[in-house]
Image: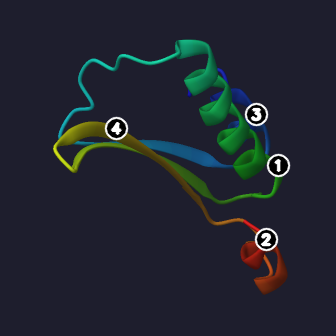
Amino acid sequence: VDTMRPLAEQRGNTMVIRDRGGAGAVHTDATKLRQCVTNLLSNACKFTENGSIAVEFERESLNGVEHVVVSVEDTGIGMSSEHISRL
């Protein structure tokens, strides 16, 4: 998040971090996780101008296994129905 904050601010955006209950320790491939979050934030910065970008971290349990869910929400141009159908 700190790496992408200057790009967000350069485009007039504010960046907010929402920690819903503490993500805690995560045992994963740090490089891949960092790259995924960087890609999400880069896209949010690219398509948002004079708006806001929120990053949320939340721990959830799925079938008895703990997961950390990372979400990025922005006030950018959004996606067309066609793009969403291809996700």
Q: Quadrant of the C terminus?
A: bottom right
> In terms of sequence position, does the residue under pointer 3 or pointer 1 come before the other?
3
Residue under pointer 4: 68
Question: What is the distance, in whole Å, between disc 1 and disc 4 at their CAs?
Answer: 25 Å
Identity of the amino acid at label 3?
Leu
Q: Are marks 4 and 2 in contact (CB under 8 Å)?
A: no
Q: Secondary structure at mark 1?
A: helix
* Residue density around tag 1, few if under 14, some if 14–19, many if 20 or more, within 10 Å: some
Front-most of 8 and 28? 28
Q: Are marks 2 and 3 in contact (CB under 8 Å)?
A: no
> In terms of sequence position, does the residue under pointer 4 or pointer 2 come before the other?
4
On screen, 27 above or below 72?
A: above
Identity of the amino acid at label 1?
Lys
Residue under pointer 1: 46
Q: Is residue 7 left or right of residue 28?
A: right
- Residue, far front: 63
Camera-side mark, 2 or 1 = 2
The image shows a total of numbered marks equal to 4
Camera-side mark, 1 or 4 = 4
Identity of the amino acid at label 4?
Val
Q: Secondary structure at mark 3?
A: helix
* Residue density around tag 4, few if under 14, some if 14–19, many if 20 or more, within 10 Å: some
Q: Are marks 4 and 3 in contact (CB under 8 Å)?
A: no
Residue under pointer 2: 86
> In terms of sequence position, does the residue under pointer 2 or pointer 3 come before the other?
3
Q: Which residue appears at 66% of the width and 49% of the height? A: 13
Image location (x, y in percent) of residue 26:
33, 20
